[in-house]
Structures are given as structure tokens and as C-alpha cells.
Image (tube, rainbow, N blue to C red):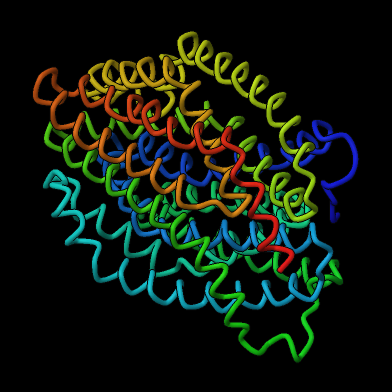
Amino acid sequence: MIKDMTEGRPLKLIFAFMGPMIIGGLFQQLYNVADTLIVGKFVGSRALASVGVTGSTFFFLLSLTLGLTNAFSIVMSQYFGAKNEEMVRKTLVSSIYITIVCTIILAFIGIFGARPLMLLLNAPPDIIDDATLYIQICFGGSIGLLFYNAASAVLRAVGDSKTPLYFLILSSLLNVLLDLLFVLSFGMEVAGVAIATVISQVVSALLCIIYTYKKFPIFRVRRTDWSPHFSNIGLISKIGIPMGLQTLLLSVGEMTVTGVINSFGTNAVAAYTTGMRVQQFATLAFFNMAQAYSTFAAQNLGAKKFTRIQDSFKKVVLILLAITLVSSVLIFIFGDVIVRMFISNEDTHLEAIVKMSKEYLYISACFFPFLGLIWFYNNTLRGMGEVAIPLFSGIVELIAKVGLSFILGMMFGHIGVWYAGPIGWALGLVPSLIQYHSGKWKRLADRIAA
């Protein structure tokens, strides 16, 4: 259902929109967790590390496409808020063209660049072959992932966060079933979970696209709309490329940190992988709150309702901080139990991995308020088309994360590396906080009207 966020009670609209996104995020994480959980439980901690060591590489290769996907949603939200249906359709067509190009480039880089990237990250010799194969399969079949993300972004732009959820739930369950089939029945191990992920993503994308075309008249493109609209593509690129560059910078930082962690051995890789998976679940609510507010801000900026944005911003920030504190408490209470779910009880490395993973989670949990705020401020600014400051925020975070991972790693070992990212969150927040409260973003509404 299409949802206009420029009218009605802001908090009710934001939370109604956010609810399906959180549920969808849970199932999106199920894609990632299913692979590590199943290979960790049924194959071993070495296989878990093989999948886990690819995480920063995935983040790196997807970074620019994620920025462009978010730009689809931002540009379309602004036109939708301004009641310009013609430009909504043209933005949809531009999104399709951009996604096709990104799919081709990503598949090529993933297939031929997997092993060089693993060597660059100093992946342990006992897991490098499986890690390379996992990347090649997933990125060779990345068409499903990219088109699902594009379709979801388009639907979020007009206030519909439910439709992508239904198909994501279906494909997530399919992914788990295929993981179990390929690993337990066919003995395919790491290759099996990669193939299961690709098949599930393609199914999800196809169903979402077909349903969207049939049920939403606003997305039924006319023959004349298929001509490339270069100014529209330029606007998407103007917003999406800096966002992608910010994500790219963060991914470079993540790859650097991964390289440092790899130097501490396969147990450290498995511990970091497990900790990251748990953290992704723990931070899901405030990540999706930031994304939901981005759409709200974009639509209301298009309608020039500045007071509506500012009033709701204050209320949502307080709620977000409360959620981050609850998440931190839950990590300290249930962290040990959850970490052990990822590794077989018979694994000889179990206790060493659990100890390191808990250290990572406890340190990160103390900084969750900063993580929630940097996501919220940056997504709000991006939703309104302000991309330079969030990019600068990412650069600050990158410098802190990379520099401190080396310095603290040499001084305190792997525990020092666990502190690098959280300190980066706190420092990266500063420029975005200053920019939002300056109020300069209001002038961006004139560009949308033009």
C-alpha cells in the first residue's frame, strides 16, 4: 500500500512504516546468519571462518551499489512528496538501467577478483580456497540481490514497506531449507550455502518485481518513459555516488580491520564473524528506524514541511537512544548463550572463540548509542539530499577505525582492535550532528521544486 508521510501523525506513520522493515531486516539477516550458523554447526569452525572472512569483501564490492540503491529511494521519495508522478516513473526506469549495469560489473569483479582480495586480506591458508569459492558463487549470481534491493528501495520511496517483506520471508525460509539440503544431504559445505543464497535471492527479486508491476499503477511505465532520462540519472548518481563512496570508505576500513584480525589467526576470524552476526541482530531496530526516518524526511522535504521534520526528529532520537540502551543490556545478559549457538559443542576451538567473541560484543554494546545516532543523523541528511557531510562523516570514521585498529592492535592485541570501530562511530557522528542542527538542509527543497 502506498503511504503519504506528509500528512497525519508523524510518530504513528514512522513506526507503522518501520515495523515491516524491522521484520524484513530480521529475515534479511537470516540470509547471512543461516550460512554461518549451518556451516558452523554442521561443518566446523573452519568453514564458519571461511564464510565469515568474506564479510568485509562483500561489504566492499556492494558498497557503491548500496549507495545507488538508497539514492533510488531518496529521489523517488522527494518526487512522490512533491506529487510528481511522471518523475516517479522516470526514476523507476533510471533505477532499472543503473541496476543492470551494476549487476554486470559486480559479477565480473566478484568472479575474477575474489582470490586476489582474499590474498590482500591475508586470509589464513586453511580457509582461503573455500572463501574464494563462496565469493565467486554469490557475486556471479548477484542479479537477484541487486534487483531485490532496487525493488525494495522503490517501494519504500512511496511508503510501502510491507510488500518486500512478504517475499523476503518466503525466500529467507527457502534459503534455510536449501542450506540444509545442500549441506546435509549433498555434502556441498561452503559451496552449498552460497548456491542456496543465490537461488533464494533470485526468487525473492522475481516475486517482488512481478507483484509490484501488477498491483501498483504508479509503477506501470509507459513506452515514452523508457527513453533514458539523463538528468534524472545524473541526480541519482549525484546523490548515490557520494553515499556509495562513504560506504566504500567504511568497507575499506572494514577490510583493513579484517586484515588485522586475520593476523591473529583463524580463531579470531571465527570470533569476529560470530560477534558481527550477533551485533547485526542487536542493532537491527535502530538501523531500520534510521532508514524509515530517511523516507519520512525525504517526502516532507519535498512538501517543504520543515517544522514537521524538526519536531518529529527530536522525539524519534529519544526513542532511538532508549532502544540502543535496551539492546546493550540484552547483549550483556544473553551474549554468551547466543554466541555458542553458532559453533558446534564438539569443536575443539569452542571456548577460545566464545571468549574472544564475547569480548567483541561487550565492547561494542557500550557504544551502541553512538552507532544509533550516526546512522540516524546520516540517514536523515541523505534522505534530504545532503550527501557531502555524511561522506565526510564516513571519512572521519574510516581514519579512526583503520588507524586505531593498527595502533591498539599492536598495543593490546585483538582486544585493541575491538575498540577501533566503536571509537570511530563516536568521532564520525560529530560533523553530521553539527550539519543537521545548522538547518542548512532546508534550502535543498528548492532543488526538488525546480
- Which quadrant of the structure image shows residue 70? bottom right
Residue 325 sits above or below residue 296 on the image: above
**Residue 357 visible in rendering:** yes
Residue 230 sits above or below residue 124 on the image: below
Query: At 61% across and 46% down in the image, what residue appears?
Result: 441
Query: At 43% across and 18% down in the image, what residue appears?
Result: 365
Specify whether 412 is left or right of 51: left
Residue 134 sits above or below residue 358 on the image: below
Q: Nearer the viewer, residue 372 or 30?
A: 372
Where in the figure is residue 388, as x and y percent of width and height?
45, 51
Q: Nearer the viewer, residue 100 or 267?
A: 100
- Which quadrant of the structure image shows residue 151? bottom right
Query: At 71% across and 49% down in the image, what residue appears?
Result: 165
Specify whether 389 is left or right of 158: left
Split into 4 quadrants, where in the image is the C terminus? bottom right
Query: At 20% across and 29% down in the image, what residue appears?
Result: 404
Residue 8 sits above or below residue 138 on the image: above
Where in the figure is residue 436, as x and y percent of width and height?
57, 37
Where in the figure is residue 126, as x and y percent of width and height?
14, 45
